[in-house]
Image (cartoon, grey):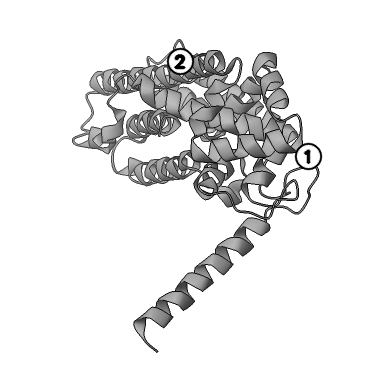
Amino acid sequence: MNKSKKLVIVATLIISICSQWLVTYSRPTATHVALPAGEIRSEAQLRSEASLYDAAINDIRKGTSIKLDTANDLKAATALLNKAIPNLRFNRSKLIVSGMSDTTFVGAVKERTRDAKSTEEFARALAGDQNEILKLNGATALQSRLARSLDADVTLIRSVSDRLKKAADAVKAKTNANHAGSRSYLSSETTTSPTPPGILLDIITLQLVAIAVVVQPAIFLVLVGTGLGSTLVIVGAAVLVAKIIGNVATDKGRDKLAECEDSAQKNFNDCMATANAFDFVIVSTYCTAAYLASAAACLVA
């Protein structure tokens, strides 16, 4: 078989596989439909996850004032924080739920997708450039508000991480124990610096698209070529679909935030596994401080 024929076969297989992948997400053709179960989070699930995120932030906020003078104080603080940190992975759900409460933006989404034709036009525009979402009434104001909220959470988490490290240093100094090298378990990610505004805005822009998809599921169906009677796959849609799935999906469609959190969790577990080689309370506090800092970095990954 010559080279050109092989290329044709490979190309045909790729197109076939991609087409099957797109079709698996949904079959409905109605304008207002439920998104495929098992892939896209329901509004109820998003709200539940947002509540978990809020609870985590509230517990982490206690770390700004909780007593950290003794080893027992550190044990209590790390127990509280270690329980809260894993739920920070639901930040995207929190952002989406917050955006859904913005009546101006939600109303603009519904108006922009008032019928099949306008919905398809909007989906095509988004596939070409996700910044098209910013043209909707109220979008830039919502983008700014959500970016400030995310930045505030990241700043809070980093401040608690820094406070925990300093407290561990102070308690270690008081005990005069030999912990040579124990602080080396802190990852390089624990260094804090302001998040560039552009990164925050880029993250939030995608969240606005995700909000629009939750508000009007037909947008997603058009993007995957199964909605409103469309059989054409929109050029550029695959990339946007992958991003949407990553931000509004169950664990089957994991996004960068979830992957980053998994890595942070693994590093934390590895750090804790070595804690007994030194003073467990001190080193475990350093582990938690590093875990917090890594979690903060994940939110803006």
Q: Residue at x 35, y 32 (%)?
A: 290
Is residue 175 something one can see in this rendering? yes
Q: Secondary structure at mark 2?
A: helix
Check disc 1: other Cα within 10 Å, few if <14, some if 14-19, many if 20+. Answer: many
Q: Residue at x 44, y 18 (%)?
A: 151
Residue named by callout 2: 152
In the rendering, at what x and y percent does residue 285 appear? 37, 29
The amino acid type, in three-letter code, at marker 1 is Thr
**Camera-side residue of 25 and 166:** 25
The amino acid type, in three-letter code, at marker 2 is Ala
Is residue 91 something one can see in this rendering? no
In the rendering, at what x and y percent does residue 81 appear? 49, 27
**Camera-side residue of 53 and 27:** 27
Q: With 91 as the anchor, is 216 left or right in this view?
A: right
Of label 1 and label 2, which has the lower sequence position?
1
In the rendering, at what x and y percent does residue 200 appear? 42, 24
Q: CA distance from mark 1 to mark 2?
A: 37 Å
Front: mark 1 or 2: 1
Q: Secondary structure at mark 1?
A: loop
**Camera-side residue of 33 and 67:** 33
Q: With 174 as the anchor, is 91 left or right in this view?
A: right
Q: Residue at x 73, y 44 (%)?
A: 35
- The circle on residue 275 is none
Toward the bottom, the furthest residue is 1
In the rendered view, would you say 189 is above or below 4? above
- The circle on residue 31 is 1
Label pair 1/2, CB-CB below 8 angstroms:
no
Q: With 11 as the anchor, is 217 left or right in this view?
A: right
